[in-house]
Image (cartoon, rainbow, N blue to C red):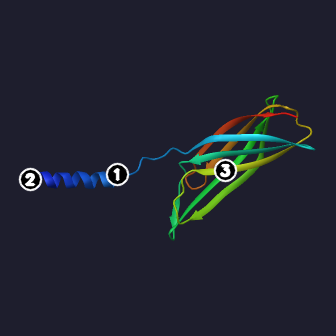
């Protein structure tokens, strides 16, 4: 009886060790945006964190490839698409956790003070998954 109990315990431990980690949803979180007054307008710095992307492991290197663009919704609710675009492609021997995506947009003097929205459009180039998030921003003189 003891041998059977020990055998069952070993099987349960083995099965629990083989379980996959739960899949993390591809998502953007913690968006931040700030506008800084310049002589000729404003500079908008915006960042967002991303998790749940797919990693490729080749030659003992973990690689990540995420493309993103930034749109701006003006106070009169008009959307200006693709004011910033970039691709984050990195490789490391260490696994990645959350990624920080950064953008910088210059607004000339034709932009008026008011409430804007920064929209991040993000795509994982390995899995094809997409996500987006928005951050409100107050532009003042």
Give 33 or 21, whichever is nearer the viewer: 33
Categorize mark 2 by other alpha carbons within 10 Å: few (<14), some (14-19), many (20+).
few
Q: Residue 114's quadrant in the figure?
A: top right
Side of 50 relative to 120 (left or right): left
Residue 78 image label: none
- What residue sits 42% from the left and 47% below the top? 22
Give 22 or 42, whichever is nearer the viewer: 42
- What residue sits 51% from the left and 71% below the top? 59
Residue pointed to by mark 1 = 19
Residue pointed to by mark 3 = 101
> How far separated are the C-alphas under marks 2 and 1?
26 Å
Q: Secondary structure at mark 1?
A: loop
| Residue 93 in the image, given as x and y percentages of width and height | 53, 66
- Between disc 3 and disc 1, the foreground one is 3
| Residue 23 in the image, given as x and y percentages of width and height | 45, 47
Name the outermost residue toward the bottom: 59
Does residue 10 lie above or below 60 as drawn? above
Residue pointed to by mark 2 = 2
> How far separated are the C-alphas under marks 3 and 1?
31 Å
Question: Which numbered disc flags the more N-terminal residue, 3 or 1?
Answer: 1
- What residue sits 57% from the left and 50% below the top? 98
Q: Secondary structure at mark 3?
A: strand
């Amino acid at each position: 009886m003891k041998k059977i109990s020990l055998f069952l315990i070993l099987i349960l431990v083995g099965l629990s060790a083989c379980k996959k980690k739960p899949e993390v949803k591809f998502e953007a979180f913690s968006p931040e945006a700030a506008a800084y007054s310049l002589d000729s307008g404003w500079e908008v710095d915006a960042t967002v964190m991303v998790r749940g992307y797919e990693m490729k492991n080749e030659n003992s290197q973990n690689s990540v490839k995420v493309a993103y663009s930034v749109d701006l919704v003006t106070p009169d609710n008009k959307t200006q698409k693709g004011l910033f675009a970039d691709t984050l492609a990195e490789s490391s021997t260490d696994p990645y956790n959350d990624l920080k995506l950064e953008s910088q947009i210059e607004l000339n003097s034709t932009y008026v003070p008011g409430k804007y929205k920064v929209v991040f459009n993000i795509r994982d180039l390995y899995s094809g998954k997409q996500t987006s998030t928005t951050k409100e921003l107050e532009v003042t003189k």
